[in-house]
Image (cartoon, rainbow, N blue to C red):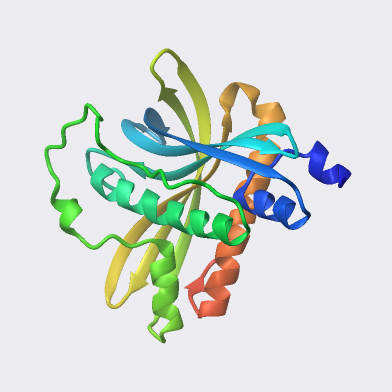
Amino acid sequence: MNSARTTLPPRRISDLVSFKAQGADIRLEPAFDIVPVDFAHRQSRYQAYIFLCRYRGAVDGRDFEFRKCYARGCPNNLCQHVAQAVLIANRHLARDYKTLKEAGIDPGQEQFTLEGMMVRFDDLKEEHEPVYTIYDFINMAKSGRKVKVAVELEEVPAVEHFDNRRNAQTFFFCDFRIEAEQRRYDYQRCLACYATENEEAERDLAVKIANARLEVLYRMFQQAGVQANRLFFD
C-alpha cells in the first residue's frame, strides 16, 4: 500500500483522482451548504453567500474531509448576484463531477439549489444575463477570438454564519477582469480558505492550494492563447 497515499489526506479533487489512479478504494459523500458570510473588504463590510461543498469520505478506509468554495453571490452589486452564483457554482461542480466520474469515483448527483433559502432579492435582472465561467472565455480564445484577462488577487477576512455557530475564515479570491468580444466582464473565483484563528497552521497549505489552482488556469490560458498576467499568493 502506498504510504504517501495513506498518510496525506486529500485536499483537492485532483488528489482524489491521483489516489484512485494508484489503486485506492475511495468512498465519497459530498455535502452542500449555502452559507451567509460577513466580509470585510478594504474599507467596506457586506454580506454575501458562499456556495460550499464539503467532500467527505474515506481513502482506503481512512476518513477525510475537505471543503471547496464554488461561488460567491451577493443580493446587491458588490459581487455576482446570488441567482447567477448558483448557476456558476453548478457549472463548476459539473466539471468536478465529470473529472471524478472519469477517474472511476462516484460523486452522486446532488447540486446546489436556492430552494428553501429564506432570502428575498429586490433585483433579479442579472438572472436574465448570460452566465459565463472562466472556461467559456478560454473556449472563446480557442475558437480564435481575442480574450484578455487582468488578474487581481485578494486575501479577505470573513465570518461564516452557520445555524448554531460563527466561523472566522480568510478567503483567497481571484478577480478576473476580462475583455472579450468588445465587452468587459468581471468574474470572481474563490481559490482556497483557512480558519483565521489557525492562520499559523493552515495558511501555508491554503496558499499552496490556491496557487496550484491558479497554475492550472494559467496553463489553460497559455494553451488557448488568452492574454493574461500571472500572479500568485505568497
Q: Residue at x 40, y 70 (%)?
A: 137
Residue 59 quadrant: top right
**Above or below 88: residue 170:** above
Q: Please identify the quarter of the rendering in which residue 119 is found.
A: top left
User: In the shown orientation, is residue 75 left or right of residue 47?
Assistant: left
Q: Could you say where residue 98 lies in the image, as x and y percent from the top left?
A: 51, 59
Expressed as whole percent of the image width and height from the top left, the position of residue 222 reads 57, 75
- x, y percent for residue 84: 27, 50
Residue 234 visible in the shown view: no
Can the viewer see residue 173 in this picture?
yes
Location of the N terminus by quadrant is top right
Q: Is residue 68 above or below residue 161?
A: below
Q: Residue at x 65, y 35 (%)?
A: 203
Identify the residue shown where x is 43% and y is 25%. Answer: 160
Residue 123 occupies which quadrant of the picture?
top left
Depth order, front residue of 28/195: 28
